[in-house]
Image (tube, grey):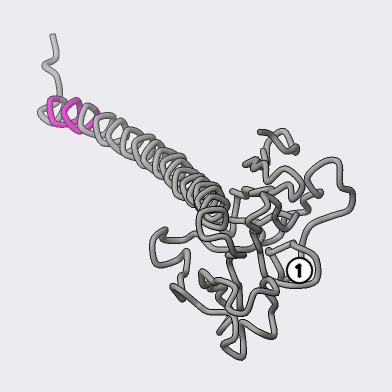
C-alpha cells in the first residue's frame, strides 16, 4: 500500500483555512451591510424625532402666544426673517395699539421681546423649509405643490399675529430635516385651532 503524500495534511489544512477565510469575509460583509442599514434606519429615526419635536414646540408656542395676547390685552406674535440662508424669528408685541405690522416691527414701533431664535440651535439638522428634491403637494384642502424658499406660508408677510379677541393669522409653517422629513404646523385663524401634519414620504400623503 502506498502511503499518502507528505504534503496531504498541509493541503487539507490549507483547504480548511481557505474556507474559513471565505466564511470570515462573507460574515464581515454581511455585518457591514447590517451596520450600514442599521445606521441608515437609526439616522432616519433620529431625524424624525428631532423634526417632530420642533413641530410640536411651535404648536406649543402658538398656543402660549394665543393666551399671552389675551392676558396682556394686545397683539403678540412671531416675526420671521431670512439671514444668510437661515430663517430666524423673534417674539414681538404691539407697541402702539394698532396691531402687528411688518414695517413697525422693523422700525421698532412694535417691540421685539425675545430673539433671534433659530431651529438649528436647538435641533441639529432641522430647519424651516422643504426637503430637497421632493415634490410635495400642499396640505389638504389646499392644492398645488410646495417648494421655493419661503416655508412661512401666512399670506404675503412673514408675520404671525395673535389678537386679544381670540383670533390669529391663518397659515402653515413648514419644518424639515432637508431630506426625508417634513412637518406642517397649521394655524386656523378664526378659531386659532392648531394642527400638526406629517408628510409620509412612503405613502406620499399628509397625515395628522
In magenta segment, residue 14:
yes
Q: Is residue 45 above or below residue 94?
A: above
Q: Looking at the image, which residue is at 42% across and 45% down?
A: 46
Quarter of the rendering occupied by the N terminus: top left
Magenta stretch, overall SS = helix
In magenta segment, residue 72:
no
Residue 66 makes an appearance in the image:
yes
Left or right of 124 on screen, residue 18? left
Q: Position of residue 145 (x, y in %)?
A: 84, 55
Identify residue for label 1: 148
Q: Is residue 104 above or below residue 51?
A: below
Residue toward you, 56 or 201:
56
Indicate the quadrant where residue 29 lies.
Answer: top left
Q: Position of residue 3 (x, y in %)?
A: 11, 16
Residue 198 makes an appearance in the image:
no
User: Residue lying furthest right in this view?
Assistant: 143
Look at the image and give the residue range highlighted in magenta. Answer: 9-15
Q: Looking at the image, which residue is at 64% across and 63% down?
A: 129
The total number of labels drawn is 1
Q: Looking at the image, which residue is at 86% across and 41% down?
A: 141
Residue toward you, 205 or 37:
205
Left or right of 103 on screen, residue 144? right
Quarter of the rendering occupied by the C terminus: top right
User: Residue lying furthest top in this view?
Assistant: 1
Q: Looking at the image, which residue is at 74% across and 50% down?
A: 189
Q: Position of residue 13 (x, y in %)?
A: 16, 28
Left or right of 142 on screen, residue 75? left
Left or right of 118 on screen, residue 13? left
How crowded pointer 1 is (Cα within 10 Å; few <14, some 14-19, many 20+) is rated as few
Residue toward you, 163 or 136:
163
Residue toward you, 173 or 179:
173
Secondary structure category for the residue under label 1: loop
Amino acid at each position: 500500500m502506498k502511503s499518502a503524500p507528505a504534503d496531504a495534511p498541509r493541503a487539507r489544512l490549507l483547504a480548511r483555512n481557505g474556507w474559513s477565510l471565505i466564511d470570515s469575509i462573507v460574515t464581515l460583509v454581511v455585518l457591514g451591510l447590517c451596520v450600514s442599514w442599521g445606521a441608515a434606519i437609526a439616522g432616519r429615526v433620529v431625524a424624525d424625532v428631532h423634526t417632530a419635536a420642533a413641530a410640536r414646540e411651535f404648536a406649543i408656542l402658538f398656543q402660549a402666544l394665543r393666551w399671552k395676547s389675551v392676558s396682556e390685552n394686545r397683539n403678540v406674535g412671531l416675526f420671521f426673517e431670512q439671514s444668510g440662508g437661515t430663517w430666524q424669528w423673534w417674539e414681538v408685541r404691539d407697541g402702539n395699539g394698532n396691531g402687528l405690522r411688518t414695517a413697525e416691527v422693523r422700525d421698532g414701533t412694535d417691540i421685539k421681546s425675545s430673539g433671534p431664535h433659530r431651529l438649528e440651535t436647538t435641533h441639529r439638522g432641522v430647519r424651516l423649509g422643504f426637503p430637497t428634491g421632493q415634490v410635495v403637494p400642499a396640505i389638504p384642502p389646499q392644492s398645488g405643490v410646495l417648494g421655493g424658499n419661503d416655508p412661512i406660508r401666512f399670506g404675503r408677510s412673514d408675520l404671525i399675529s395673535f389678537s386679544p379677541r381670540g383670533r390669529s393669522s391663518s397659515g402653515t409653517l413648514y419644518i424639515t430635516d432637508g431630506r426625508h422629513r417634513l412637518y406642517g404646523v397649521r394655524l386656523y385663524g378664526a378659531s386659532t385651532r392648531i394642527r400638526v401634519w406629517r408628510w409620509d414620504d412612503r405613502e406620499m400623503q399628509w397625515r395628522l
